[in-house]
Image: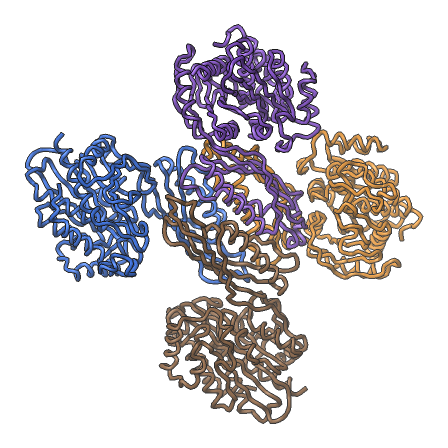
Chain colours: A purple, B brown, C blue, D orange
Amino acid sequence: VINRAHFSEAITWRRNLHRLAQPSWLEFYATGLIASHLTAWGYEVKLGTEIFDPSKQLLPPSAERLAEEYNRALAAGIKEEFILPAKGGYTGVVGILRGTSPGPTVAYRFDIDSNEARESQEKSHRPAADGFASTVPRCAHLCGHDGHVAMGLLLARHFSENRAKIKGTVKFIFQPNEENLSGAAAMIPKGVLDGVDFLLGGHLGVAVPETGKIAIDVHSSLAVTRSEVTFRGKPSHSGTRPDLGKNALLGACAAITNLYAIARHGLGPSRINVGVIEGGSTWNVIPERVYFKMETRAIENSINDYMQAKAREVLSGAAKMYDLKLEVVPAASCPSGHNSPELVAIGLEVAKKLPWVKEVIPDIAWFGSEDFMLMAEVVQKQGGQVLFVLHGTPIGGGHHSETFDFDEEAIYNGADFYAAMYDTLTSR
Amino acid sequence: VINRAHFSEAITWRRNLHRLAQPSWLEFYATGLIASHLTAWGYEVKLGTEIFDPSKQLLPPSAERLAEEYNRALAAGIKEEFILPAKGGYTGVVGILRGTSPGPTVAYRFDIDSNEARESQEKSHRPAADGFASTVPRCAHLCGHDGHVAMGLLLARHFSENRAKIKGTVKFIFQPNEENLSGAAAMIPKGVLDGVDFLLGGHLGVAVPETGKIAIDVHSSLAVTRSEVTFRGKPSHSGTRPDLGKNALLGACAAITNLYAIARHGLGPSRINVGVIEGGSTWNVIPERVYFKMETRAIENSINDYMQAKAREVLSGAAKMYDLKLEVVPAASCPSGHNSPELVAIGLEVAKKLPWVKEVIPDIAWFGSEDFMLMAEVVQKQGGQVLFVLHGTPIGGGHHSETFDFDEEAIYNGADFYAAMYDTLTSR
Amino acid sequence: VINRAHFSEAITWRRNLHRLAQPSWLEFYATGLIASHLTAWGYEVKLGTEIFDPSKQLLPPSAERLAEEYNRALAAGIKEEFILPAKGGYTGVVGILRGTSPGPTVAYRFDIDSNEARESQEKSHRPAADGFASTVPRCAHLCGHDGHVAMGLLLARHFSENRAKIKGTVKFIFQPNEENLSGAAAMIPKGVLDGVDFLLGGHLGVAVPETGKIAIDVHSSLAVTRSEVTFRGKPSHSGTRPDLGKNALLGACAAITNLYAIARHGLGPSRINVGVIEGGSTWNVIPERVYFKMETRAIENSINDYMQAKAREVLSGAAKMYDLKLEVVPAASCPSGHNSPELVAIGLEVAKKLPWVKEVIPDIAWFGSEDFMLMAEVVQKQGGQVLFVLHGTPIGGGHHSETFDFDEEAIYNGADFYAAMYDTLTSR
Amino acid sequence: VINRAHFSEAITWRRNLHRLAQPSWLEFYATGLIASHLTAWGYEVKLGTEIFDPSKQLLPPSAERLAEEYNRALAAGIKEEFILPAKGGYTGVVGILRGTSPGPTVAYRFDIDSNEARESQEKSHRPAADGFASTVPRCAHLCGHDGHVAMGLLLARHFSENRAKIKGTVKFIFQPNEENLSGAAAMIPKGVLDGVDFLLGGHLGVAVPETGKIAIDVHSSLAVTRSEVTFRGKPSHSGTRPDLGKNALLGACAAITNLYAIARHGLGPSRINVGVIEGGSTWNVIPERVYFKMETRAIENSINDYMQAKAREVLSGAAKMYDLKLEVVPAASCPSGHNSPELVAIGLEVAKKLPWVKEVIPDIAWFGSEDFMLMAEVVQKQGGQVLFVLHGTPIGGGHHSETFDFDEEAIYNGADFYAAMYDTLTSR
């Protein structure tokens, strides 16, 4: 049982994080906050390239942005020793606590990045009214990852204060860049999941809009693959010699229309979207270059593979149509996944007994994507078990909306569930 | 000067042809009518594979259609000896008259095929009122080639009656299949243009809607290339497993839209059209096969080549998009072309002096296509000269319309112009 | 229990039907065969416009085809009195047997039409080897409806021979035109389902490829809507004045591509297909008219409605793009549907006890469409219950393939299951 | 004859302008330079809203940009009195010199704006080598308008020094914003062309790449219309509920592809281009808004009107397809036009007699667009005559290329031709 006395401090952590929201690969404040506390509480702390493979840093920020956010963390009081290893955007923290007796390795994964979006500054929006709305331009925690960090820290403190009960190893994985689905892929090659027997994680608020509820078997997550697509042709004056151009925009339009027209798969849901486009130079020049962001999703990895294979055909066909060069750069991807039935069964039992639980929702179809599933795949392949749950809380305005907010009780509840799971997993 | 006494017979020929309209590769009646008269008038007559290369017979008719029209010609009184060589659809006639003194080879080209279309049977339509409307289902002379044949025969008779004046050689080329632009290409490989010094031809009614007018320098004809395009994919039940299909219709739609979007050429007019489409099997099957007819045109051969090259890119890109097999079968083509300036100058002089001429139109931009231009190209390459003119006549309802008709005076006028040209060409 | 002695006659019925395959609205032979037997067995028989609303006869056959198939039935020995009421293509039969004691109205629905497709005449194909392959050009029973008719007749004979056990009313609905999903809609307005308490039906072979198996709860059928779409523009010579045309083909291509691109629905599977296209006149004319067949499907009626609404937007937008006239003619539609849980439970119990049953498959997701579901919707709305099952049999070559065949034991098994259901339904 | 002694000063003006390149609506330095000299030379000078209709200021610059360039001009020594009236971006100057005897009003039009593009700073580029390359970020005179201004000032000084010879009125129209084709439209409503009998203008370098040549009858300019197009739909999460979105990108793609597919006009060249696109927010959101720049061109105003009418149909059809809001904002337009035959004849005579002229090119087909033609249309409608010529000079690297340069002799030659024209026009 998590000590209620520490809860107010967890709220402070959360609000400070909220105020200083930093997005993917730029979570220096969160990294420093976590690392300094875990160190103080006796955890073995790993940072930077010990836990982060720079070759997997997709869509890296500019040097300018890195410097800006790094300095913002320092200015907020983070000691540089805790973020120096992360300086190139190699954010995230792993904390390890070894028990006094043998037992399994139980890992908890929490994501730490903010969104790149503006938060409401209206007084009707609680974070604004209570003075902890984001102060970082165009960045804000509108998905609750600030709450996830606070939940993780509250849990980590609990274990450090109950070290005698630890059997085996407890591992905390504070993962950067969940929003672009790329953080898990950057940590895995460095062995952060080696030896993990149980991996637990969750999300607050999604699909369970009431405090005191918890959903245990979150299934039907979607595999997702994102790419940056560029068509390159040849400019020409569109008034005098349109025939000398190679029109990258016509290629892109042919591609995009036909991407959406890829045949629906007969064996399960699939999705495709082109979310952003830009290209061309001016009115009277045949567009030489068009860039767009494309993603596919599907209920099964194999169906997502189908979407990707078809998308490649459409893209290369469109390039051929207009004699264009095609570049497809991977931007993110994560698999679909499923909880381990054994852990689902344990989770249902554990949740039922918690005093604050009003309702245990046995299962829920999610249709979202989470790069937790990439870690899940690795753990399950090595014989471990995984569980991803949803922590109930009402939310203001929907995930990613500018008025997103949540009930901070969810921080306590989540940490308490994870602590109880630990007790059961180590007492069998 | 053409003997006016023969004109009524020319009208009879024209009306019989009109009544017995036969389209491309099926002009058995015209072939027999021409061959029997030329033979009677002392011409050396060539038929069938002597003047027709079977390997160039694009879009050949079915055996059934060949038999039907062959028998129709026999039933109308044609002696089989004159059409037996043409039995496989190798229609057309070349007639040669050698003079008594040396001189140039002057060739006249007349096209002989009907359209594949229905003629009006209303009494307001003169051929119907006067009893010579087409009796052949779905076939009719709606472009005046029946008049061209009559004009050619009237001229041929004139030469045979004035044989003493012939210097060098007179050659008549009665060409099949102008409507599908493929007859000239079938005759040329057999040497019908060998040694031709002057080639003359024309069309009645087009752009000169008044009897007694004649246009001499007809320029700006368009090069044209026609193809039959087929996309082949894979069928699949569109309700249960749409993902297993390869959709030939989506490929065709991508191709067609983007064919029309090929960039306009900066150096001159170009055209593209997909005129006919068909494909698919039933409601709930992904279409396996789609077929369409495509043509490009342009003011210059090089611009038509540009259109063809771009069209090939679009077609193969669309095939790649949907993993389809692509087949492109040539259906017809002819170049753009231009009259020889020397013959234009002579033509202007000659026309001015003819008694029936009300107005000589020096030049006219045509924007039509004619496979005369393929013959013109060959003759000009071998050092000869060519002239293509337009014979004035009002026309009922436009070329190819079901009420097309013309003033039969144009038959006399055309023959008379050609006879006068001969006198000048051999008297220099 | 169905009397095994009658089985060989059922096989004869089936094979005669197979030999004389007639498709939608032309099932004169089946109508006559059924009507004559039901009459002989003491049923009240209803025919023609008593059970068929002519205003609902979508895609009616030509007068020529009607006469041809009507005469074919007469020539095969059908007495005209049994098909005269169906002469306009108002095919189908309803047979009613009233019991001697009160009880529910139990209705059985069997579909009777053949496919419009060619059957294999190879000796490796059993119907050909055994001399009962279709003798009707381009028509064949490749979906097993001939077996359905035989199953229905075998069952009807059983009831007539066990009339003393009938409580309430037994009703047989032999429905025409299931293949185009339009027969149920033509019968319902005439009250054929009035008072029906239980409606039973099924299909042989689909998804249960083994004799002795039966699937009880067939769910996830798809709603479907079919339309014939025509775009009409204006022709123009594509060489001289392409600007004067209104290109129906460009409109159709824009429509078709974007129809497939309609956003996948987030709440369940949807489908769209354009299965057939044709249009245009010739190479050098801007296509004036293009016609295509379009269908949408979805797991829920509401999702199918979504697809239809979006499709209408796409079609009318494409028409506006090219200033075309748009005509959308309904061709068929049927809802998705679900079995009544009470009947599923009874069906599972009944099936388990039948001696020939090797395995009862509790439920199966179908993803097919059936206009039984339109009848089901009506019966359920009036408070009745419905059950649609799948009768196991291996099939040769797949439904609708030219080598489709089935194990005739399925005829006996199906009738036997329905007879057993009756006993249970009337003994509760 | 222009006084050669003033030529070196003209070069200085040109180079200062080149160094301080300012683009459309921001030509404060040019405005101040011109206004101060004309004032000094005794011209009546009109500025700001006297000659500029603010309601016609299409695509106005931001307040920030206005301030930046205004201050840049002040910093370069321009006295504020000469640019204060232009402060809102109302740039341009009209200078009037009235003669001592009656005569016609002869107007000269020169354009003054730079391009928005980077100039080469390589030493191989003469302006860079000689120290007068542009110092304004992303702005440069790469079209020679700096030379046009110098030519105009040299001519204006000539008239002021030969005032006794002036008959009637000389008017100088220094027009802003030719690059976006919007300056003429902003000046005309203020009456700058009232009473103009002759309007002369020209361009240096285009199509006449040799000093000492001049082309007199520049014809076949293209009418052009530019618009900013925005489609607005509705965002939705593309993974969970794609069906709730309205996809502005699919609408834009349908529009763009079909814009390029608008049928070629049979009566003359037409063009269409979409030169720039941008839209959407992120990977997994259905794009809510897409913006693009579209232009049409044609040899005749009526054909440009055809392109615009068809484009509107395509745009509104695409909007309807995806239930989008469509906004089309005019961005620029100018007509095609033609010189007045009388002035062409005079121009040919005048040019022949100039000592520096090596070759007079009688006529040239241009296929470019110029908003001079809007002024030409107005002058011709009020009974005046116009002449637009091309001044020969080699150019480095092509118009709008980063190494554009020209032979400054063209400045003298152009002014000298205009001066000679004046003598002839006033001596008839």
Q: Does A35 sit left or right of A384 as displayed?
A: right
Q: Does B85 sit left or right of D26 as displayed?
A: left
Count of picture labels:
0
Q: Nearer the viewer, residue A209 or D269?
A: A209
In the rendered image, is residue C83 in sight? yes
Q: Residue shown at 81%/55% (left/top)?
A: D392
Q: Is C374 rendered above or below residue A380?
A: below
Q: Which residue lies most toward the right here?
A: D5
Residue C82: x and y, percent? 14, 54
Q: Which residue lies most toward the front here?
A: A102
Q: Residue shown at 66%/88% (left/top)?
A: B427
Residue C368: x and y, percent? 33, 42
Q: Is B330 rendered above or below residue D276?
A: below
Q: Does B252 sit left or right of C207 as displayed?
A: right
Q: Nearer the viewer, residue C123 or D134?
A: C123
Quadrant location, the C terminus of chain C:
top left
Residue C94: x and y, percent? 16, 45
Q: Nearer the viewer, residue D217 or B289?
A: B289
Q: Does A161 sit left or right of B8 as displayed?
A: right
Residue C274: x and y, percent? 41, 49
Q: Nearer the viewer, residue D72 or A40?
A: A40
Where residue A339 sits, quadrant-wise, is: top left
In the rendered image, is residue C52 in sight? no
Q: Residue shown at 15%/53% (left/top)?
A: C33
Quadrant location, the N terminus of chain C:
top left
